[in-house]
Amino acid sequence: MFTQPIGVAHYLVVGAILFVCGIVCMTTKRNTIGILMGVELVLSAAILNFVAFSQPAFRVDQEASLGIDGHVFALFAIVLAAAEAAVALAIALNYYNNHSTIDVDRAQDLQG
Amino acid sequence: MSSAALLSSILFFPCLGALVILFWARISPAMCQKVSLVCSGLVALATFSFLLPGLPWSFAPYEATVQHGFALDWIPSFQIYYYLGLDGISFPLVVLTAGVSFLAIAASGTIKKHAVSYYILILLLITGMLGVFLSLDLFLFYIFWEVVLLPMYFLIGIWGGPRKEYAAIKFFLYTIFGSILMLIALLMLYFASDLTDPRLEEFVKSDTIIQQTVGSQALEGIEARQADDAVQPLHTFNILALQKIGQLTDQFDEPLLWGYSLQWWAFLLLFIGFAIKLPLVPVHTWLPDAHVEAPTPISMILAGVLLKMGGYGLIRICYPICPEAAQWFAYPVAILGVIAMLYGAFAALAQWDFKRLVAYSSVSHMGYVVLGLAVCSVYAGGQVDSQAWAMGMNGAMFQMIAHGISSAGMFFCVGMLYDRVKHRQLDQFGGLFHRMPTFSGLSFGIFFASMGLPGLCGFIGEIFVLLSTWKFSAVLAIVGSLTLLLTAGYILWTLQRVYLGFEYHGPLPEKLSPATKGEISILGVLLAFAILLGIYPQSLFRYMEATVTQTADALAERLSAKEEPDEQQAQLRIDPLEAPADTKTLLVERVQP
Amino acid sequence: MNLDRMLPLLLGGAWLLPLLAFAIIALGGHYLKKTSSQHRAGFLSTVAILGSFVLAVVAFSMWVSDQGLGEPHHGPEFERAQLEENQTPIQLAALAEEGEAEHAHDGVFSVSGVWYIWAQVGEQKFEIGYYIDALTICLFVMITLVASCIHFFSLGYLQEELETGIKDHLVATSAGEPFERVGRQHRFFQYLSLFCFSMLGLVLAGNLLMVFIFWELVGICSYFLIGFYFERKAAQDAANKAFLVNRIGDLGFLVGIMALWGVLGTLTFGEMSTKLAELAPETQQQASPNKTTIQAASFLQDEEAKATNDEETADWNVGLLILAGLGIFCGCVGKSAQFPLHVWLPDAMEGPTPVSALVHSATMVAAGVYLVARCYPLFTEEVLLVIAYIGVITLLMAAMMALVAVDIKRVLAFSTISQLGYMMLALGVGGWSAGVFHLITHAFFKSLLFLGAGAVIHALHHEQLLIRMGGLRHKMPWTAGMMFVGCLAIAGAGIPGLDWGLSGYFSKDALLAQAYAFAQVNPSHVYLYWLPLAGKALTAFYIFRLWYLTFAGKPREKKLYENAHEAPLVMLIPMMVLTYFAITAGWQIPFTPSSVTTILEQALPAVASFETPWAAALNYPAEYLSHQYHTKIAWTAIATAGTGFLLATIFYVWQGLRPDEVQKQFGPLFRFLQAQLYLNEVYHFLFVRPLHGIARACSWIDRHLIDPFVDRMAKGTVNLARLEDQGDRKLIDRPIDWMSASFYDLAVQLKATQTGMIRQYLVFLVLGTVGFFFIVGYLWQL
């Protein structure tokens, strides 16, 4: 793998590593901020994949398009992630105001 | 005043009274009675005014045709019209209905419970009964027939005696059973009827109501049919048109089921329906229960008018529409009539309850009606004696009116006693002649009218029916005349047990007060009519005889024509393209049982 | 004078006057009673009937002045018969045939017409009309005369009914005291007036249906009058019995009317004879032109078939005619108390005595005889023979019962039955005028006897038992004397040599002579003469037994005797009038050869002779032929009656034989007669109880067969509905319920996975996604 030129697969591997790191971070951290960081990692992995798959080699209608769909999606996702982070931080802040903690394991109010 | 406005206002005036009572806030029972009394009194006056000569709307005697007939669109897509009219058959019954209803409301003074609903129901009932007799559209007739049912159910079920629920439900179920059979027959007839038959041309052209409603359509159809074009059949609910179809064409002769024709089945179903209402043995057992439990005024209406609906249905619908079936059923029906006469009389003889006795006497008396209708005599050589039949039918009609008067009076007598001493056990009366002399005298008159004493109304119907039965079957006439003896037996025995004797030996003797003026006038009116009809029956025959005789004549003509295998007739009757070759013989065989 | 116009007017007026009185008393009776003049209702009624009498007499005199008194029928044959004294029966029969042929006069003068049409159906009319001939007029006079007398008598007899507190000793209240009630004289006169109206209407009636109407009306009046003392159970029962037994007869009458209507197509008296003539076999055409039948093509019938058909129709018609005759006679049997329907008349004596005199001896019970006389042309020979035999049976049986009766009114009642039997017999053997004549004379002397009995009962304060009377002639000489005349009249006393006698002498003589003539030409029916003759001895015996026990000898009950008194004048004068007629009714009218018989014979109907297929060979001697036997018969009759009289005298005056010993000797027979042949019991057992049984059975069927059937049907329907309801619940509802329940359970179980731990969710999410992709990837490869 390392001997081959950088291709989509490499990007994907990096993305997968990032994704797994994010997942691990989300599942192991009890701190809300930590989990949010995990979420950011997962989002980064997804964005990386968008960018990776937007290379022209994957397209069949190359003449007709600019070939920047993946990038547009990536930018979109980044904006979304920022918005999401803001909302999530607001939740965390409110949660803290109500419960004096940001430990997600103690947030069991939604239990069925 | 146009016929439409006149008849409709008579018909729906009681409903108006009911609305007044309904919307009159905090109305007292006495006021309810007054309103109903005025309302039914006006209706009675209006109907009685038809009897006066010289008025623009007076009913012409010796006239066979429909008077004041009119038709308005109701559901024209199904040829259903709001078609009302009076003729010799319905007019006496309408007058009877109005009169008896008025007296019944006058006799309702003792009703205190839920007076508002009582009077509303009774007024609705009057509209229903008038509607049954006035309507000449089969569908409308059926609607009114059902309209009568519900108020009666509540009137028995709410204001009745101890077993009122049982009686009311029994009444309702019996009648609804009959109604359903009727409905089937009614639809059968409707879908088999076709006004575009060339044989009906004359009728379609001459009948103003048909002209007014479906005349042009029918005439077009007739022309098309004569030109051998395909025509959609034009069904009808018009009773008179159905009668003509039954009498002039073979539309109801189609074999329907098990080798019997459509009219055979229609007759059977209709007959059962009407026989239940009449009531005829063995479907009569709702009557004693309903009567015993019903309050006095309701018993009066029940016996005085409601039973007549059955007889009216027979004479208006059953017989004229299905002549051949009528002939087929002549013997079974006549025998049933005789059985009802005897059985009712015997059962009355065995009763210990005064009201039950009177109820069974109704069964016995209505047997005469059936017998009188059934006597289509057939002589050898295809002659049908229309005279005997006309006499029987007239006797039956007269019997209905006479029974309406006498039985209403009898039930009122029983009710008066029950109101006072709260029991009806025949062995616990006696000596009433001393305590209530005027009442007893009037009761004797009423009971003798029921017994068929000459000079009172009960006699004429019985003698006419028996005389006509003699022409039909001497044996049946002789057996039937035994009823006279039995009737005398139970009436005299009852009078002995209740009125004669020197002392009253039942409970509450102190309550036996003499009759009030109101009670005396109710009984007096009934007795006056009983005497009038008894000594001058022509006063009734002059109104109804022409129509009834014409009905009998038309039927006899049809049957006589049917008897002769005339070539032309046969061709007219059987379309060789449509009917198989042996239908002709089938038809002929069916006619002669 | 125009008879056609005047007679209906006069007789109609006479007929309606009592109705007017009835209506006034019925409607205003209460008022009439309350006023001070308490006799008002009685007077009103009496005045009405007197008015009727006057009108009837005027009508009678008009009739007589127009039609004459009638001549005795002594045709040429009569003289010939007198010349040839000892004829053989066969000769006589030939003579009879000849006489019939010559004498068949159809010119009975009558006035008939219609007052109004009662009912009309199609072509068939039923009318209220009149038929007036000599018979009608005579009966009108007789009825109104007797009724007037009895009205006057009743004013006295029912005096006590004016009081407000009458003690009825025959009715004990629960306290054991005699029942006390308010008098009701006005009711009595009300019924009496209604009765007079009905009776006159019956006689005046122009057709059989109208006869039937009034026939029933007199029956109901009789019911009211018998039950006048309706507090007494016996009176109630007697009234019911009278009406019901009469109704049995009326059923026969009705069948007769129906049969007659079937065969003749008319019920009007005036038209009957012409219709009958059409029916007569010689002139047999296709009958009943009155029917408007719809003629159908008769291609099926050829001429031959038609001919046989005609013959069959003729036979059928004659059969119907016989049925009609028997039916009408059946009505007469009921009304005239003939065997076997006589049982009601003795019981009917429960009514007040004037009623027994008027209704149950003079008029109503005679209506049956009247009707037989009126319908005489309708009766075929078989029917007449039946009538004759019924008459004979009745007259003997009733006479024997009268021998043993102990109640004064019952003796007279049996005597009435017996005399009615005589009338029927007379009519049955062809003695039309003899029968009707006896009807009239009997009305006079029997009502006299009843009124006498009434006076006695009145004097003895309602004691009716003969054995408690006796010696009353000292106390009531007038009554005793007049009753003796009545007894002589009913026994037929007279002097044959001088041809002088009381009324009964002439009438009985005439009818016995006719019976003898009949027996002469029909030897097989000789008993029709001998038995009535024997009956005559019985008549004399029982009637004088009654007189002796009442008036002769010594008083048996001192206390009753002491209180007895002669009747007041208002009662005696009517009796005197009746006595006069009881003596003279049979006499010739002065200065003329005529008598009541000849007037009656103006209405003598022509007897239609039918060649009936079932006819026994009967010969009916014409009535005038029997005149030759009168003297001979009179002697025989007087001898037999004398024997009876002598026997009665031996028994009850000379005490030569003791009645109680004779009773002992004939014990069983005596008891049998006293129990009226146990007929009441037999009827009760044979008819009344089975009828009640059937009635109970019908009621039982209703309650235990039909009702349970209907109820079961209803219950069955309800049960079916329940079953269906159960099916609903078990088959359809339950699986659905189970499904929802199991989903719920599943959800509850799954709830455990909802820990609320967000990280755990995330793990599941990831694992799930990974797992999903693994599975998809795996499946993809497949």
Image (spheres, rainbow, N blue to C red):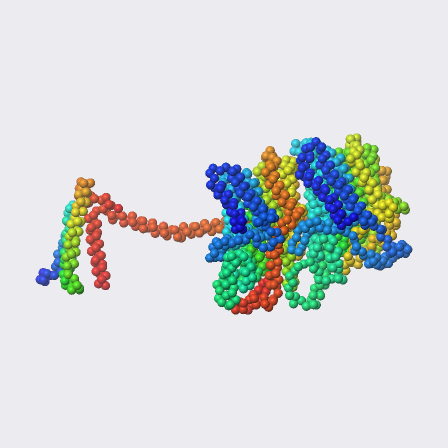
* Camera sees residue B31: yes
Query: Which part of the image, by quadrant, shows the C terminus of chain C?
Result: bottom left
* In the foreground, A48 or C6: C6
Q: State the residue at coordinates (51%, 43%).
A: B17
Residue B261 spot, x, y in % from top left? 54, 61
Q: State the residue at coordinates (57%, 64%).
A: B587
Residue C113 spot, x, y in % from top left? 73, 51
User: Can you tell which quarter of the image residue B566 is in?
Assistant: bottom right
Q: State the residue at coordinates (65%, 47%).
A: B534
* In the foreground, B554 or C88: B554
Residue B309 spot, x, y in % from top left? 56, 50
Residue lying farthest left?
A3
* In the foreground, B424 or B35: B35
* Camera sees residue B476: no
Q: Is residue C297 left or right of residue C505?
A: left
* In the foreground, B486 or A109: B486
Residue C191 spot, x, y in % from top left? 70, 40
Q: Is residue C698 left or right of residue C241?
A: left
User: Can you tell which quarter of the image residue B392 is in?
Assistant: bottom right
Q: Is residue B68 above or below residue B199?
A: above
Image label count: 0
